[in-house]
Image: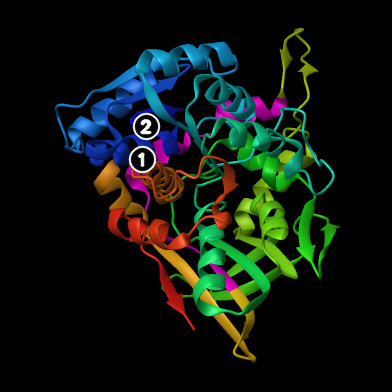
Amino acid sequence: MKKNVLIIGAGGVGAVAVHKCAQHNEVLGDICIASRTVEKCEKIIDSVHRKNNLQDKTKRLYARQLDASKSENVVKLIEETNSGIVINVGTAFVNSYIIDACLEAGTAYIDTAVDEGPDMINTPYPWYADFEWRRKPLFKEKGLTAILSVGFDPGVVNAYCAYALKHEFDKINVIDILDVNAGDHGKFFATNFDAEINLREIFEEVGYWEERQWKECERHTQSMFYQFPVVGKHKLYLMGHEELHSLSVNLDVDTVRFWMGFSDHYINCFNVLEKIGLLNHETVTTAEGLKVVPLKVVKACLPDPASLAPGYTGKTCIGNRITGEKDGKEKEIFIYNICDHQQCYNEVESQAISYTAGVPPVAAAILIANGKWDVKQMVNVEELDPDPFLDLLNDIGLTTKEEK
């Protein structure tokens, strides 16, 4: 297959993906990074050269302008760049256009988050099958590989589930995905990735898979404390999250839940924004007659997540607490990763949230290129052999650890 890579998206995650592809361009070939704002792409390329992360300097690393909301634009760029793999790390609002372009151009597809429309708020559970999964027959018919939602969560946590089922359990009963950022960016309030996506995610009602049925509750109404390795004890809130959808379908498991850590300060800021209407995703008209979307205004006012990296300190911990049975006995493990903000900045000039989301799609691209994950159909990560993926991540920056 053609090995050149097209990376769509020039935010914090896109920057990490470019650095990591550049470090492994002997496998991935020429690398093109594309975004609506080509200047952002060029800054990332400057960063790659500044950190001396382009391994094979005979290979190209270059930028192109792209409006990915039109499939024909994406098809044209795939053909121009002779790309065999597309890594979509842009906004999830354009997933469907890029997927359709890959189908037309005959190119492997990777993303890090499920497709969603700008008007999708509190869509009834389960909703995953309404979007990317509808194209499963087309990818299989054309013999093309598509690996969905291969960031960290979703993505690596899905592989943790597959690893646990393969190596640690005869039967899994409960999966609790736990995500805490114990770092400090020094800002009064900021989101660690796209503010519009992040705040919408927290704004929505909570959906979770429990006792083999979908349940819902109000946001921030269920919480617990958990003692994490390295980063210590943190309060976590039950949230809806996209990996619950595929895991509940692809694994024979009673319960899958997602928990994320938030400080009291973060919750207070979020509640104020929500109560005064600034998380509204619909258009409003100002007294001057300007039409604006409050949530987009908030995004414009908050720090760019990529700008947080230089002064970020501390660590993240993301992992799965899994309970089940092995040889007729009850068993529990915690399988996880610790990522250091400062170390990430030293390597790729990004913070750990972007790093944990940006490294896994590059690992997936390498596994497609070398044939180990070139499965010629559309899959979620838990449907693939987790061993080569986790082994590769160990080698390229995201180490998996386990407590039993």
Q: Is residue 306 above or below residue 289?
A: below
Q: Quadrant of the N terminus?
A: top left
Residue occupying the point 71% across, 52% down: 245
Mark 1 against mark 2, which lies toward the viewer?
A: 2
Q: Earlier in the sequence, mark 1 or mark 2?
A: 2
- Asked if the stretch drawn in magenta spans residue 87, the answer is no
Which of 394/249 is in front?
249
Residue 30 appearing in the image = yes
Residue occupying the point 83% across, 59% down: 214
Task: Tell me residue 244's x, y (percent).
Answer: 69, 56
Residue under circle 1? 369
Q: Is residue 363 above or below residue 253?
A: above
Is 354 on the left or on the right of 175, as rendered? Answer: left
Image-quadrant location for residue 97: top right
Residues at circles 1 and 2 in contact by the CB criterion of under 8 Å:
yes
The crowd level at tag 1 (other Cα within 10 Å; few <14, some 14-19, many 20+) is: many
Span highlighted in magenta in the image: 294-321
**Amino acid on which the number 1 mark rests in the picture:** Ala
Image-quadrant location for residue 368: top left
Task: Tell me residue 329's x, y (percent).
Answer: 63, 92
Mark 1 and mark 2: span between their CA atoms?
Answer: 7 Å
Task: Tell me residue 170's x, y (percent).
Answer: 61, 80
Residue under circle 2? 1
